[in-house]
Amino acid sequence: MSTSYPNRPARGGRLPALAAVTALLVGLAIVFAFFVAPEDADQGISQRIFYFHVPIALTAYACFGWAAFKALLLLWRKEERYDLESYVAVHQGTIFGALTLATGSIWAKASWGHWWLWSENQLVLFLVLFLFYSAYFMLRFSIEEGPRRANISAVYALFGVVLVPVSFLAIRLAENVIHPTVFTRDGPQMTGTMFLAFCVAWVAITLLAYTLYRVELAGKRLDANLRELREALTT
Amino acid sequence: MTYFADVAALARKDLRLELRARDTLPAMLLFVVSTLVVFHFALPADAGELAAQGLLWLALVFTALLGLARAWAPERESGALDGLVLAPCDRSAIWLGKALATFVFLGVISAVALPAFAVFFAPVSWETVAGVALANAGICAVGTLLAAMAAASRTRELVLPLLFLPLAIPLVVGGVGASISDDPGRFLAFLGLYDGVFALLCWASFEYVVSE
């Protein structure tokens, strides 16, 4: 690895402002989802979880994609900082993936009376991805820190983005033969206000993920710098 | 053509090691037959052939895991992998050689497991045989790379199943579909797609797993 000082501290000042904007937008999204958007005629109040469930799921995908992009940069340019960035993105993606499973499960219970439905392709896909990325942490933390760990983590993160379409195809294929389709759901038929609420929530959740990403990155970099300083002092 | 000569030499080395030491293959054979027997008692008496088809795939995947956990053991002992990485050959050849040797092992396992399954449970169709061959290729491609990752970690045997099983889900879907579906062609094509995509990815990325 080439860079001599990989863990530059984040340029201060911007992070609190980013956090403030995020908090504002998340608040706005809550207002839109609960008070502005009209009640769904068919599903009633339970439909409102849609404004969070779908943006959280899309954000989780974005995090995994971002992690794979950083992993590719690491393998390509061999700069150490990409390792931490890729790891933090996977971490955020896994958190948002778990939230997707939780909100999806709640929605399924409210709409169909079951906590879990194997016929819900997206949910099953998230379960597979959740298991896959949970193993990422097991792998990462059982390898000694260093370029080898960075490389292996990066290759594994790249596997993730390939696994998404392949698994989705597999689940689509499986539902016809192995599991009968119990429920079919049309795409959300949305009015203008509903779509607006959805968009606000989407932007808010994406920004929330980005803010958490920056905060965790800043913290992890601080940790790394502190460790380096301590080592420099003790040796 | 030196690349393929390297691959052939590496695969031959693994096969010869196994022929002389007989470390892994007998254990895998015994394991797959034992698993089938356990499955007989795990299934309710009226479960029928369809359920048994699914268990065949479980037995194959778990047996493959058993072998994959040992796949890099000869290289790890006495640091042979470092020597291989330093050798003037393309590093992806190391992966391809290992994957080919593992493919041969899994072929032997399948040649025992499928007749055993036919005797114990239900007749085996040609589609199942084709599915097993394609799935074995995918298991070898992905499994040897993941095993190399796991070999670099402290918790080797523990972490490999965690890495492998989520990636094996599409293979199980394809395999079970090929066994029981009315239209096995789609599932066989899917298995072929999986093999192609992941083999390419593993071939391209193996270098980074073994080097620093």
Image (cartoon, coloured by chain):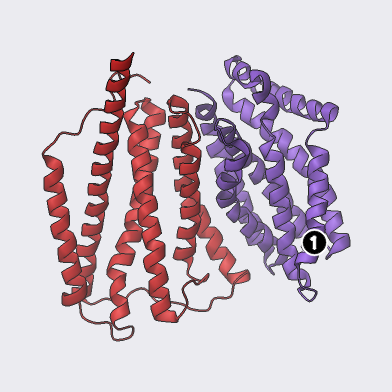
Chain colours: A red, B purple
Q: Say which residue appears at 17% left-offset and 76% top-offset.
A: A35
How many labels sit on residues? Answer: 1
Is residue B3 shown above or below A154?
Answer: above
Question: Is residue A196 something one can see in this rendering?
Answer: no
Residue count near mark 1 (Cα–Cα under 10 Å), binned few <14, some 14–19, many ≥20: some
The location of residue B141, given as percent across then percent down, is: 62, 40
Nearest to the observer: residue B90 or residue A201? A201
Is residue B49 shown above or below A138?
Answer: below
Is residue B83 shown above or below B209?
Answer: above
Q: Say which residue appears at 78% left-offset and 76% top-offset.
A: B46
B94 left or right of B28 in image: left
**Residue type, label 1:** Ser
The location of residue B61, given as percent across then percent down, is: 69, 50
Question: Is residue A55 something one can see in this rendering?
Answer: yes
Nearest to the observer: residue B159 or residue A22? B159
The location of residue B59, given as percent across then percent down, is: 73, 54
Residue found at the very far right of the displayed protein: B119
Residue found at the very far front of the displayed protein: A234
Q: Secondary structure at mark 1?
A: loop
A234 left or right of B129 in image: left
Q: Which residue is mark 1?
A: B125
Nearest to the observer: residue A111 or residue A73? A111
Residue A41 position by quadrant: bottom left
The location of residue B107, given as percent across then percent down, is: 78, 43
**Chain for disc number 1:** B
Residue A15 position by quadrant: top left
Q: Say which residue appears at 24% left-offset and 42% top-offset.
A: A214
State which quarter of the image contains the C terminus of chain A.
top left
